[in-house]
Image (spheres, rainbow, N blue to C red):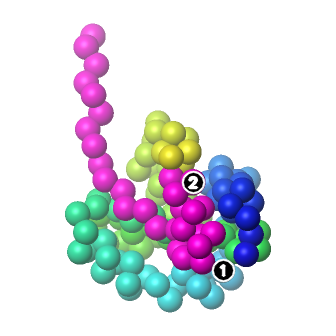
C-alpha cells in the first residue's frame, strides 16, 4: 500500500487533470461497489457522493449525483468540476486528506457532499 503522501499526491494530480483516471482500476474495484454506494446516498441526507480509489499510482473516481446518476472517471471529474465551479480547488484541498486517509487504511475514499447556499454579497 502506498504512503499517505503518495496517495494524496495521486488524488490531487487526478483531480487537477494531470494524471489520467484508470478504467482498469474502476472496472476491477469501484464498479463492484456502485450499487452499495448508491444505496448509501439514498439512505443519507447528502446531495451527492464522491468515491475515489488510488492503488499503485492508478486512480479511479465515482460520483453519484442528487438524482442517482452514476458518473465514472473522466465523466465524474467533469461533473464534479461543474457542480463545484468556483470552489473546486478549495473543496479538493479539504477532501483529499480525508479520502487519502480512508484509502491508506485499505478502504474506499468516500465523502458525502452537501450543498450550502453561498453568502449573498451586498452591491
Question: Which percent across, then down, holds residue 98?
Answer: 52, 57
Task: Provide the residue designation for mark 1.
Answer: 25
Q: Earlier in the sequence, mark 1 or mark 2?
A: 1
Question: Which percent across, then down, holds residue 105?
Answer: 59, 73
Q: Residue at x 39, y 78 (%)?
A: 37
Relative to 62, is 19 above or below? Answer: above
Q: Quadrant of the C terminus?
A: top left
Is 25 positioned to the left or the right of 85 in the image? right
- At mark 1, the secondary structure is helix
- At mark 2, the secondary structure is helix
Relative to 19, is 94 above or below? Answer: above
Q: Residue at x 28, y 43 (%)?
A: 116
Mark toward the viewer: 1 or 2: 2
* Res. 88 in view: no
Question: Which percent across, then down, holds residue 28?
Answer: 63, 88
Name the disc covering residue 97, or none: 2
Q: Residue at x 23, y 63 (%)?
A: 45
Residue 79 lies in magenta, yes or no? no
Question: Residues in magenta?
Answer: 95-123
C-alpha distance separating marks 1 and 2: 21 Å
Amino acid at each position: 500500500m502506498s504512503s499517505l503522501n503518495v496517495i494524496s499526491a495521486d488524488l490531487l494530480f487526478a483531480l487537477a487533470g494531470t494524471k489520467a483516471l484508470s478504467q482498469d482500476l474502476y472496472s476491477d474495484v469501484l464498479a463492484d461497489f456502485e450499487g452499495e454506494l448508491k444505496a448509501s446516498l439514498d439512505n443519507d441526507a447528502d446531495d451527492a457522493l464522491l468515491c475515489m480509489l488510488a492503488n499503485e499510482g492508478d486512480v479511479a473516481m465515482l460520483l453519484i449525483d442528487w438524482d442517482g446518476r452514476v458518473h465514472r472517471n473522466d465523466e465524474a471529474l467533469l461533473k464534479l468540476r461543474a457542480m463545484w465551479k468556483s470552489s473546486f480547488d478549495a473543496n479538493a484541498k479539504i477532501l483529499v486528506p480525508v479520502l487519502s486517509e480512508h484509502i491508506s487504511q485499505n478502504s474506499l475514499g468516500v465523502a458525502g457532499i452537501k450543498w450550502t447556499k453561498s453568502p449573498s454579497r451586498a452591491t
